[in-house]
Image: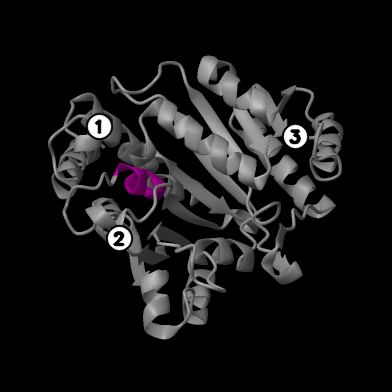
Amino acid sequence: MTYKIAVLPGEGIGEDVAPESIKVLKELPIDFEFVHGDIGYETYQKSGIALPDKTVELVKNSDSALFGAVTTPPNIPGYKSPIVTLRKRLNLYANVRPCKTFPTSISREGIDIIVVRENTEGLYSGIERVEDGGNRVITERVFTKTGCERIIRYGLELAKKNGRKKATFVHKANVMRETCGMFLRMSQEISKEYPEIEYDERIVDAMTMQLIKNPEIFDVIITTNMFGDILSDECSMLVGGLGLAYSGNIGDNNFGVYEPVHGSAPKYAGKNVANATAMILAAKFMLQNLGEVKYAKIIEDSVLKTISEGKTTKDLGGTLSTTDMTDVIIGNMRTLLNKG
């Protein structure tokens, strides 16, 4: 079988790290067809569209997709984040971000968390308006029963499938009584169908403190769009930073677009200094969800060995370039592949 993979490097360091993940995947005894698509602000500057329809169709007609990074300028009227738009158009309603201790001194011990974030609703619904001659601006926080139920069930099923013991639901229902209130009530009700998973609920501001103080007590975190965005970045810093943080945007039938969490960091673009680990681990996550678990583990083990040896980019305390660190990872992969 040949997997068709849509590759959307984007811009900035996205164009530096995306090729590294492809180099890693090409080392495996798996057939891939990599097809590149345009996305991002540079695409917008050339064509007036940040997410061309042909890119959406490419992703739709692929087995999976890898996304690098894009720049989303805040001062362009009508400009919307193309990755947020892609998530909506493909109904990739679950953003899943594993966050686990890495073998480096800048990583906290004992952390093994999966953050499951609703990906298409909430404050990132993109419904905004200006009123009263610019004196008042409004962003709508849209929740639906369908959206709440599917992210709650997705998170609980993920916990069950992976043998996780506890699910923590994060909300602000004490203030946002309708939106978070609905999410919380549905969490309480649906969780009754999963008696093997301990139910836990936290108000978001208290959760941010507990995540710093006692991260090891959390297992699976299930929450709404903006809260998940913030908490997952917080988790990332606990284990080594955004250079190690990756996620999958998952929809029905387990179809996914996989990405590093970091932004485009244009000041580092083209300098061969960016940490490609998150992009490589995003490719690992993609393989895992495609059912290629054996080869996903080979990539992960090779990355962990590389980090444990201190053969890393500068952000992790090492001295290697982007490509040099990838070469070390590939060397470790070849050793494992030769062992069979």
User: In this view of the protein, which residue sits in the foreground, 291 or 41?
Assistant: 41
Q: How far apart are marks 2 and 3 (CA)?
A: 35 Å
Residue shown at 69% from the left, 32% from the top = 170
Pointer 2 local density, CA inside 10 Å: few below 14, some 14–19, many at least 20: many
The mark total stands at 3
Three-letter amino acid code at the position of disc 3? Lys
Three-letter amino acid code at the position of disc 1? Leu
Dividing the picture into quarters, in which one does residue 85 lie? bottom right
Indicate whether 74 appears above or below 287.
below
Q: What segment is highlighted magenta in the picture?
A: 277-283
Three-letter amino acid code at the position of disc 2? Gly
Pointer 3 local density, CA inside 10 Å: few below 14, some 14–19, many at least 20: some
Q: Do we see residue 44 in this rendering?
A: yes
Which residue is tagged 2? Answer: 12
Quadrant, the C terminus: top left
Dividing the picture into quarters, in which one does residue 19 lie? bottom left
> Sequence order check: which comes first, mark 1 or mark 3?
3
Which residue is tagged 1? Answer: 316
